[in-house]
Amino acid sequence: MNAATESTLHFVDPRQFKARTAEAVDDAHLRASFRSAMDFLQTKRAAHFGNVDEFEALRGVGRAIRQYSLAKLPELLPQLEAKLTALGVQVHWASTPEQANAIFLAIARAHGAQGMIKGKSMVSEEIELNHRMAEQGVDCLESDMGEYIVQLAGERPSHIIMPAIHKTKRQIAELFAARIPGVGVTDDVDELIAIGRRVLRNEFRDAAIGVSGVNFMVAETGSLVLVENEGNGRMCTTVPEVHIAITGIEKVVERWDQVLPLYALLTRSATGQAVTTYLNVINGPRRAGELDGPKQVHLVLLDNGRSQAYADADFRPTLQCIRCGACMNHCPVYARIGGLAYGTTYPGPIGAIISPHLLGLEPTQDLPTASSLCGACGEVCPVGIPIPDLLIQLRHAAKHDALPGHAPLAGQASAKDWKEALAWQGWAWLSTRPTLYRAAVAIGRRLAWLTPPWQGGWTQHRTPLKLARRGLRERLAQREGRH
């Protein structure tokens, strides 16, 4: 694996998170839409995981598979590359988004391609493939309906499974009418889908290159597994002459039998389905005697900060994620502000723990604090990622230097505040000296009337903190005296 290197591509700057959050909270329609959507997804998931014991048993298997795969990652990746190469797949390694985009551009240039047709791929969003290729004169058209909608709107996906979940049927109808020639406004969902299909049908046929993501990679067989519902993924990977798949280095498992439990957890957790409509397994380009399929298959394996998370045992569980989105669907913060407020490829709880590795802690320091730590994300995670614990660790890393024996994260201590640090040092010194502590508290009570009405972020939505007239110790002593 390549070491993580500094790379800070931003379609929307995460530093603007607080401002965008305020705007989202003020949007009553957005809050109502997301609350309704999250309730629907929670209900669908619960229907498949009604038996808590069965869910915990399956989750235990999923967690064990992901932990086992990560423990063997340095061995599995070369094994996967060797197997894929033997099957005719060309494997490319990219440390950064810039390197990944350069690989895509080189393949496009080699084939004289002016356009690509894309299936759903969050890793392609991560490297901002569409925008980087457009800068070089290569058009990338999204074929997943949700991705197609947000591409027409010039937006980033707001959910990793349902990219356009923030848009209403009416907004989509008006968008199609404005951006697709010859289309009028219609509120009929079937007609809207038919419009999208008509636009995309010729693109599948004419595109020289098809692009897809990868849900799982199997090292022993050299298989690329793609899970989808619309069939566009199968079109992208079979109709064009060249297929380029892109994924993170952590998506590999050792054996085929390890895919099945993860697949069962993914579909039920993501969309509340027992199985998805399509499960595609790709084992190389078209072979002699075969009538269809691409003539070339390429796989781009992206690091982009994943090695940083992998190197620290405390943060390695972040890479267990199978991108189901269940943590978002159950997060009270995400349900109120939506995905666009985060400004990162991966929003919600999973985004808050993975984005600091992809982009560094400096621009993402506010994301780990965007949580009530209610624990819902950890409870529903199908592979047992301790998300609340990781959020706390990242909060600490943003404000403190790395502990001895730990390599610093990119942007470690970027949110350090010398005033806050001094205050805590003073508190630690005073709290270990009981006599002085009691004296300071007594003085503080007498001067409580001097408490300032403004106390930073605390008083934005709360009353000012003020020392009580009597402390707990005095109250207990008085109560004991009455008895």
Image (cartoon, helix red, strand yellow):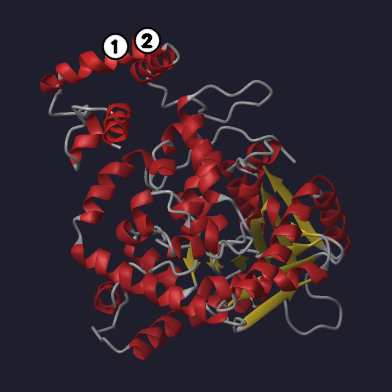
Where 276 sits versus 392, above or below?
Answer: below
Please give the label number shown on residue 435: 2
Q: Is any atom of residue 252 visible in this view?
A: yes
Q: Residue at x 86, y 83 (%)?
A: 289
Residue 136 visible from this viewpoint:
no
Residue depicted at x 82% and y 49%: 72
- Asked whether 457 or 115 is in front, the reply is 457
Where residue 476 appears, x then y in whole percent?
32, 33
| Dot 1 and dot 2 residues touching (CB under 8 Å) | yes
| Quadrant housing residue 166 | bottom left
Q: Is residue 246 above or below residue 432?
A: below
Instruction: Name the residue at the left extreme.
Output: 449
Q: Is 160 located above or below residue 307 in the figure?
A: below
Residue type marked 1: Ala
Disc 2 on helix, strand or loop?
A: helix
Spatial separation of the CA atoms under disc 1 and disc 2: 6 Å
Q: Which residue is mark 1?
A: 439
Mark 2: give few (<14), some (14-19) or many (20+) Cα within 10 Å.
few
Looking at the picture, how far across and down is residue 288, in whole percent? 86, 78
User: From the image, which quarter does the N terminus lie in?
Assistant: top right
In percent of the image, x 45 and y 14: which residue is there? 432
Image quadrant assignment for residue 223: bottom right
Is 5 located above or below residue 432 in the figure?
Answer: below
